[in-house]
């Protein structure tokens, strides 16, 4: 079953390669969507794909790359729109 989730990751998540880490995890799991830095220091990601793959991405983002310190991951479930062909880093 396809699902979509918007994740807001807070902590030390900018300047540590978090977006590129997210892109690598997304490619490995075969999900689509995007990731971007927010002006308030958080990272926002929209992930769409098979439920198990999206859950694995969510878990990986809860850990982050070496050098990151994830304090919280806020998750919103959304209706999958199927509008993304790949995963992009914004």
Image (spheres, grey):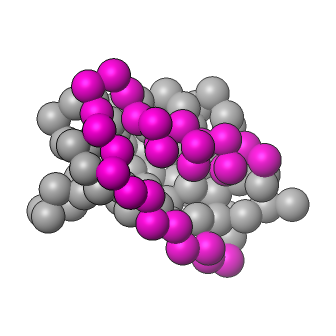
Q: Nearer the viewer, residue 37 or 84?
A: 37
* Residue 68 sits above or below residue 34 on the image: above
* Residue 28 sits above or below residue 84 on the image: above
Answer with left or right where residue 30 lies relative to residue 46: right
Q: Quadrant of residue 29?
A: top right
Task: Name the residue rendered at 38%, 57% in the picture.
Answer: 72
Task: Name the residue rendered at 67%, 77% in the picture.
Answer: 79
Q: Which residues are magenta?
A: 52-79
Task: Name the residue rendered at 34%, 45% in the picture.
Answer: 70
Q: Is residue 72 magenta?
A: yes
Q: Residue furthest top?
A: 66
Task: Name the residue rendered at 16%, 56% in the picture.
Answer: 41
* Residue 35 sits above or below residue 40 on the image: above
Q: Is residue 70 visible?
A: yes
Across and down, in percent, residue 38 comes to 21, 60
Answer with left or right where residue 81 lies relative to residue 71: right
């Amino acid at each position: 079953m396809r699902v979509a989730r918007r994740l807001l990751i807070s902590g030390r998540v900018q300047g540590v390669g978090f977006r590129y880490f997210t892109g690598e995890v997304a490619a490995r799991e075969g999900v689509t969507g995007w990731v971007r830095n927010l002006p308030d220091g958080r990272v926002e990601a929209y992930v769409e794909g098979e439920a198990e793959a999206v859950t694995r991405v969510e878990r990986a983002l809860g850990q982050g790359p070496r050098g990151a310190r994830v304090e919280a991951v806020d998750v919103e479930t959304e209706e999958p729109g199927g509008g993304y062909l790949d995963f992009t880093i914004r």
